[in-house]
Image: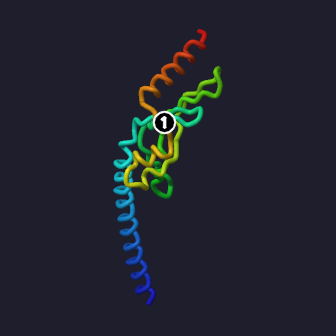
Amino acid sequence: MKKDLNGRIYEVSKKISGLEQERKELLKLLIEEQKEKLKPLVGMAFQQEDRTFVISGVPKERGTMTGTEFNPYQLPVIVVAEESESIIRIEEDTIFSKAIGSEDAKTTIRKEYQEIPLTAFKEKLMRACQDIWDATTF
């Protein structure tokens, strides 16, 4: 009787292990599919109140002790923020968007944020860099 139960437990454990491996492979495929859907958003620039930002890439995966963490709703951006005339910040950040859940990611993100030409973002970034350089004393 004991051997029979141990044998059944072993067989169940093998099935669970196989299903976990299949789940990991499917998750990996899903993440790659989501990244491909978000790639057309990279390089788009937006204005939101005192922040101007450009989408700098697709979300990245993070390995954790329990597996892979990936948030397709959180997009990496480079931000130029003017807190006042004398305080300008340039930083990496993230924005949240429902773009991954829609048929047309670009249309969705344009509804969420006010798009501006990439050249306008670049000009603002260069101006901020120049202001920082001018304020630096060596």
| Residue at point 40%, 66% (across, down) | 20
Identify residue type, mark 1: Phe
Q: Residue at x 65, y 20 (%)?
A: 86
The quadrant in which residue 7 appears is bottom left
- Residue 137 as seen in the image, left or right of residue 40: right
How many numbered marks have been drawn onto this rendered protein structure?
A: 1
Q: Residue furthest top?
A: 138
Q: Is residue 74 above or below residue 115?
A: below
Instruction: Indicate the position of residue 27 as horizontal and vertical percent values.
Output: 39, 59
Please, what secondary structure does the residue beneath circle 1 have? strand
Q: Establish if 12 lies above or below 65.
A: below
- Most extreme residue toward the bottom is 1
From the top left corner, tell me how far across and down residue 49 is, in percent: 59, 35
Q: Quick one: 16 or 80, which is closer to the camera?
A: 80
The residue carrying mark 1 is 46
> Quarter of the image holding residue 101?
bottom left
The image shows residue 116 at horizontal and vertical percentages of 46, 33
Q: Is residue 132 above or below residue 110?
A: above
Q: Toward the viewer: 63 or 126?
A: 126
**Quick check: 124 left or right of 22?**
right
Q: Is residue 71 visible?
A: no
The x, y position of residue 38, in whole percent, is 39, 46
Between 69 and 46, the one lying in front of the other is: 46
